[in-house]
Amino acid sequence: MNGKPVGLAIAFAVLGGCAVEQPTWVTDRPHAYCYQTADDACLADLISAHLTKTPGGPTRDEAVWKTTAVVRIAGTNEPEALRALQNDAERFACTAQGFYWEQASEAVQEAKAGRFDLALASISQIEDRDARDFSLSQLVQVSSEAKNDRALAQTLDALSKDNEGAYMDALLIRLQVLLNQGDLERSTALQNHLLDYFAKDPSTGTEPASEMVISYLSNGLKLDAKDFLAKAGSEIPGVTSADNLKLFNLVGQVIEGYYPTPDDFYQFSTDKARLNAYLVLARHYRNIGNKSMVTSMLVEASRFSQKASFKGNRTEVASSFADFLRYAK
């Protein structure tokens, strides 16, 4: 052959100062997010990508507005994909949903700045119940972490009058914070109250009851977790499913210093259970301040959720990742 090899021809052209058009697979941004890191920007992109793959309708619209609020609370730039989804949601909305959720995010930002009275006053003016309940639930977390009992009591009182289900979910957050703070007396009383409520409907009580077991395990309270699991299992059978027991065992090992391996996650029977395992461990590492392992678990979770073969509810997946946005720095 008279011609030079293609690779050498390109190299000579570059060295000679000629412009060379690169293939699109070199120049285009990859359509995968959080493959090496898990900062707030890539998480926002990842969440938006999952919502883009979700069928349009009221469920997705609510998830879009909630995600938008979380992104704003975290101080993150809104991805173009998320803004496009907002436009779609507004096109078919009968009310000014975007305005209500903007009010919600602004109120939570006030609380994060320590202005709880102003935050609560702002929330009381939000006409949309979903946006109002979201902001109140966020305030439960913020006021609990700030140990502002007055603001917490006012927030829980407002939420209990507005939405019993959201109120009980907020109490799950409260339980986690109490355990983190070592307040075992109040956490025990709250545990009993929560179990009584969630046991009324075992079909929906499995997930919150499982969260309670993990809350105890993550704080090193293995005996308390075992006692609660025995009590909850008799009233909510789903909490002792095979996948849950595998997860509880893995969390118990990790809190004792075990480093999870890829094989630990292959043992779960569904994509949802496997993804949940990654995120549960990410929350544990977040709580103990191990940033490198938080990143590791989130990266593995994001890679897994973006596989072509992944089977899961994209709205739920987006919501699960959104929980980490305000902690990703």
Image (tube, rainbow, N blue to C red):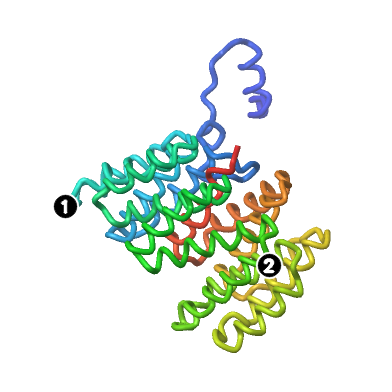
Is 153 placed left or right of 65 in the picture? Answer: right
Determine the residue located farthest toward the front in the rendered image.
Answer: 150
Mark 2 touching mark 1, by CB under 8 A?
no
Tag 1: amino acid: Cys
Relative vertical location of residue 182 with respect to residue 81 in this rendering, above or below: below
Q: Nearer the viewer, residue 181 or 326?
A: 181
Residue 158 percent across, percent down from the top left: 36, 57
Point 56% across, 74% down: residue = 209
Q: Label 1, on which residue?
A: 94
Q: Residue furthest left?
A: 94
- Whichever of callouts 2 and 1 sits on the residue coming sooner in the sequence is 1
Q: Is residue 294 above or below residue 276?
A: above
Q: Tell which of 104 and 87 is nearer to you.
A: 104
Q: Position of residue 31 (x, y in %)?
A: 50, 44
Q: How far across and down, in percent of the image, does residue 7 sit?
A: 66, 28
The disc at residue 216 is: 2
Decide: few, some or many residues near mark 2? Use Cα within 10 Å; few <14, some 14-19, many ≥20: many
Furthest residue to the bottom? Answer: 234
Residue 291's label in the rendered image is none
